[in-house]
Amino acid sequence: MNRTAKRLVPILALFSTLLVSTLLSSNASGAGPGTPNLYPGEWLNPGQSLVSSNGVYSLVMQTDGNLVLYQSGATVLWASPWAGVPTVANSKAILQTDGNFVLYRPDGVASYNTCTLNWSECVSHGQSRIGASLTVQNDGNVVIYNSSGVPVWDYRPDNMMPTPDVTECFDGGSSNPSGAFCRTDSLTFTWFTESSVESADRTAFSNALATQYNPTELTTTEQSPGVYSGTSETDVIIQENSSGIVSPTIARVWCDDEVTSGSDVCDQHYLRYWYGSDQVPGTVMPCHELGHSVGLTHADDAAPRLWKNDANLGCMAGHTDLRELVTSES
């Protein structure tokens, strides 16, 4: 799969939550309301906004509590409710002195943060994630940079392998769920359900592919029978059995045929799940596990890292909850 597949919509979350801020004082520092930049200790209060230097893009802390990124004052590019952030009137945002960008409700409770501070849970891939500035750029992106000018967060995340925290997988073989998932090797994505998969379950997987993956750059095709070797292997083999599935886990995805040793690309994945007898998977599990077989990661392996319930990740939401990593400066 080429890197354009990183634009998978809507599952890939092209809109990771971002929240910007402004200071309460003057613009003497070149930051704050009406400027592109926010620096540590500066707030964005209700009714205030940051504006790109070309005047096209604005990040507005609305009085209704929504933080919204606009293009030309009218087109909404991103809004905090899209990231699962509750709407509470008169909320405000700050780039804290610890580097974290936080959206606070009027009662002082943090409803969102970017995890850009020096906590062990927030430090990744060998570089400082401490935010030193937040900028609304002329290209419409909103980015937090560290003191070295390295981007450590933006509102358009990448959760397609490889990411800085997940760079390669390893072969588990056809029967070893302890292997890791990788990125699929083709935009033509083939799938096969083995005889263990019940009819209703097969329909659930088929529906997930049709509604969530076909609208993307992938072309999905069911193969029957499945191809287990050679140059045209089926991209994902789906099985229903309990071998290697340890509660509370209900499903695993792993690579069976890594394209080259040490790479992040896999020619064939296995997807094994187990709910117990006579239980239908529903909609979330098939979409989530098929996402892994395509190469999509959890929130804490995305770049930048996200909190687990970020709605922009769609069915890939889940795992470490970074919303809790807040030191208050309200």
Image (cartoon, rainbow, N blue to C red):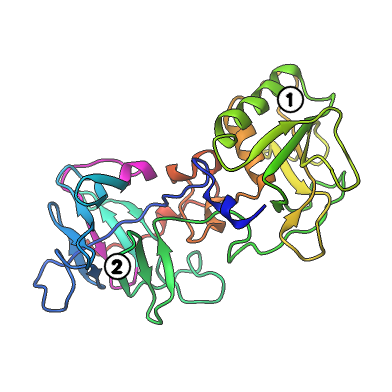
The answer to which image quadrant residue 153 occupies is bottom left
Q: Mark 1 or mark 2, which is nearer to you?
A: 2
Give left or right: position of 274 versus 78.
right
Left/right of residue 280 with respect to residue 254 in the rendered view: left
Between 136 and 279, the one lying in front of the other is 136
Residue found at x 26% / y 45%: 75
Q: Find residue 211 and name its label.
A: none
Callout 2: few (<14), some (14-19), or many (20+) C-alpha neighbours within 10 Å?
Answer: many
Mark 1 to mark 2 CA distance (whole Å)? 50 Å
Q: Position of residue 113 (x, y in %)?
A: 36, 57
Quick one: 185 or 330, which is closer to the camera?
Answer: 185
Instruction: Give the residue type that dot 1 points to.
Output: Gly
Is 85 colored magenta in this rendering?
yes
Considering depth in this image, is 109 or 266 the residue closer to the camera?
Answer: 266
- What percent of the width, then of the height, locates residue 130? 40, 73
Q: Residue at x 41, y 54 (%)?
A: 324
Reading the image, the residue beneath label 2 is 135
Residue 276 numbered mark, or none: 1
Which contiguous range is marked in magenta?
78-99
Could you tell me which residue is drawn at 52 percent across and 50 percent down?
7
